Amino acid sequence: MSMMKDDEYLPLRDVVFNTLRQEILTGKLKPGERLMEIHLANKLGVSRTPIREAIRKLELEGLVIMIPRRGAEVAQITLKSLQDVMEVRRALDVLAIELACERMEQEDLDSLYQACENFKAAVKTKDTRMLAEADVAFHDKIVLSTGNTRLIQLVSNLSEQMYRYRFEYLKDASSHEMLQQEHLEMYQSILKKDKITAADVVRKHINNQEEAIIKQLQLEKDDRRKNV
Amino acid sequence: MSMMKDDEYLPLRDVVFNTLRQEILTGKLKPGERLMEIHLANKLGVSRTPIREAIRKLELEGLVIMIPRRGAEVAQITLKSLQDVMEVRRALDVLAIELACERMEQEDLDSLYQACENFKAAVKTKDTRMLAEADVAFHDKIVLSTGNTRLIQLVSNLSEQMYRYRFEYLKDASSHEMLQQEHLEMYQSILKKDKITAADVVRKHINNQEEAIIKQLQLEKDDRRKNV
DNA sequence: TTGTATTTTTTTTAATACAATTATATAGTA
DNA sequence: TACTATATAATTGTATTAAAAAAAATACAA
């Protein structure tokens, strides 16, 4: 009698997909690094088939670049690609918060306030990982409240991709206070159903992040120049 | 048949991907229809491997729903899914035209005007296929002029998905004049670099389309009720 | 007839085998 | 040395095979 918790079955291709995705987002797999099938298959203890299927999905997500008959490699992080992502994210986050102003129920609002508080607590701990999670949780609540499946999917995708850049940036403690303040402003404007202010805050929020990340990228570049 | 230039080599998986995608978008493959590997492999004269890889990509695009160990089927068209897509598209098309106002060069503007004229010509022919192509061409020019790779990818994806709904709707000749008029207004506002008007026209454009498509969906529903 | 086991078939999943292509190393030549 | 040609190895692309699971068909009992 197998005590079946078999509900949690995930095809190997999806396990591989999630694994590779995570490694790319956190930087374990570096930009430009080649994804060789046999190599990955051995490393993960599976055959090439699920590896290939996972790579197809990563390709469509833009995390991986395919060159026919040469294979896949981790997409580069460039200033341009960052700006492209941010431009789109800004538009979608503005849409999300505008819809949230229309559609959030009292229950959602309470839960959003709680997320604000959680972020505040995370700032105090200075644990980057917790901070990142609290930040994601806050933004997720807004996007989820729109009820728009497509939007939810796209934003979660884009914002996860940003972690390729953002994770480093969150280590800079000087910005934490500001993030916290902006979260509160977002909450308040949604509470007042004030779309215009809400949109402004979001834009400011994204702009700040973009700026901070660009600074980070610049630093890395300088480092490379010095150290190599 | 190897009459294709070696430069234009496309892996079978991509050929299959494009083929299936097109069949879903045009409705040859109907919502809910199962995509069975051996069947498709025989039909397209390839092995199952490229079929599977193509299905993974369609899955990520949202055109196909995967049920583990049961297989893939064509995603359903519902009023909700249409509204979700349109909500996102509206935001991204507004972004695109705003960026176009900033970034279009004289050359691009001329080419956009040409696209307007082409659409006008297509309206006269009353050939739905030509009309659809001319419409896509016009919108593509705007999006491409932004130079934002990510945006280009997302919009092309979303707008193609709309063809699942829109193709039928374009058969309704009564809307053609209006579409043509709206294209011209877009061109003119980009020419004047008038973001606000441009954004308004785009919103109106999308709203009109959404409305028309909803009407179509409603009709189909009524038809089914009567005929079955 | 209805409901439940049991077997068979179909289908997906995963691994493996083979072919085609590209990258790399080596040897020969000017 | 620099360059080309050729052989060799590594890697991707495609097909096939084998295993696992689900669906369908069948048989049997109430």
Image: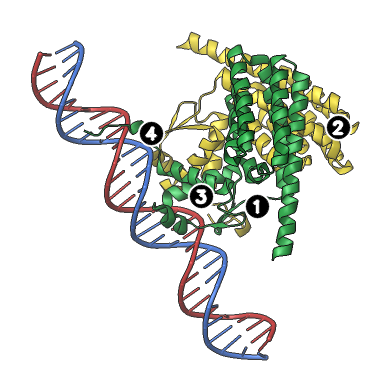
Chain colours: A green, B yellow, C blue, D red
- Tell me if label 1 and label 4 are in contact, CB under 8 Å: no
Amino acid type, residue under disc 2 in the picture: Ile
Marks 3, 2: nearer the viewer: 2
Q: Earlier in the sequence, mark 3 or mark 2?
A: 3
Eyeballing the image, is A119 above or below A73? above
Q: Earlier in the sequence, mark 1 or mark 4?
A: 4
Q: Position of residue B41 (x, y in %)?
A: 42, 43
Amino acid type, residue under disc 4 in the picture: Glu
Marks 4, 2: nearer the viewer: 4
Q: Specify the subunit that label 2 lies on.
A: B
Q: State the separation of the CA atoms marked 3 and 2.
A: 41 Å
Q: Specify the subunit that label 4 lies on.
A: A
Question: In what quadrant of the picture does the N terminus of chain A appear?
Answer: top left
> Which residue is most to the right?
B192
In the picture, the disc for residue A8 is 4
Q: Which residue is mark 1?
A: A76
Q: Which is nearer the eye, A20 or A123?
A: A123
Task: Respond whether the residues carrying marks 3 and 4 are from the same subunit.
Answer: no
**Residue A171 seen in the figure:** yes
Q: State the separation of the CA atoms marked 2 and 1.
A: 33 Å
| Left or right: residue B200 compared with residue A168 | right
Question: In what quadrant of the picture does the C terminus of chain A appear?
Answer: bottom right
Q: Which residue is mark 2?
A: B190
- Tell me if label 1 and label 3 are in contact, CB under 8 Å: no
Q: Which residue is mark 3?
A: B12
Say what secondary structure mark 4 lies in: helix
Q: Quadrant of residue B112?
A: top right
Eyeballing the image, is B35 above or below B85? below
Q: Position of residue B186 (x, y in %)?
A: 82, 28
Q: Which is nearer the eye, A95 or A180?
A: A180
